[in-house]
Amino acid sequence: MSPMHILLVEDNPSDRALTLRAFQKVGFVNEVVVVQDGAEALDYLFCTGEHAGRAPVNPALILLDLNLPKIGGLEVLRRLRADERTKGLMVVILTSSSEERDLKEGYEAGANSYVRKPVEFNEFATAVQTLGMYWMLINEPPPVT
């Protein structure tokens, strides 16, 4: 597992496929690991449950939906920020929610960015390309301690 991978936390099969297709369309070469709910995201990130045997290599970026089964996206984010091992991970909330409350709570919980999913595919592909370029190539992450 490359440290330059992305973790996509998305329960909606159409949105997962759309995101992966958008990455393919723009020629994104980094690995994208997909989990389908908040509990699986935490298992992946903390190497527990079905991901207990995984090498503890954190993703360079987490794309986190808010409306997830089992454990919601905001709670996932709060747990990441509360743990020394994951508090510095880059987390972009990628959601269809246009609720101001979600935006406010997302930043208060520690999101690095909040992006609303565009409805039209070409706009979505452009947004994914911009996210990938910025967070994987341009952004300078904090040093690993």
Image: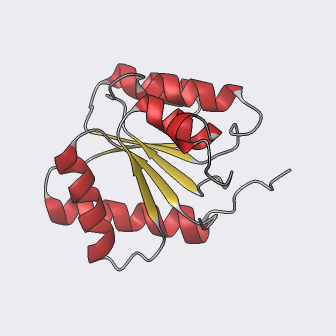
Q: How is the image coloured?
A: secondary structure
Q: Residue 63 or 55: which is nearer the viewer?
A: 55
Q: Dividing the picture into quarters, in which one does residue 45 lie?
A: top right
Residue 98 lies left or right of residue 132; in this view the side is left
Direction from residue 48 to residue 144 in the image, left or right: right
In front of the other: 97 or 4: 4
Asked whether the viewer can see residue 118, the reply is: no
Instruction: Residue 67: tell me if it is visible.
Output: yes
Q: Position of residue 23 (x, y in %)?
A: 33, 68
Q: Residue furthest left?
A: 120
Residue that appears at 15% across and 50% down: 119
- 63 is higher (above) or lower (below) than 32: above
> Which residue occupies the foreground of this view, 46 or 30?
46
Residue 88 location, x and y as percent?
Answer: 70, 43
Q: For this rendering, which residue is in front, 26 or 29?
A: 29
Which quadrant of the rendered structure holds the N terminus?
Answer: bottom right
Across and down, in percent, residue 10 comes to: 33, 42
- Residue drawn at (66%, 30%) of the image: 81
Horizontal relation, residue 8 to residue 5: left or right: left
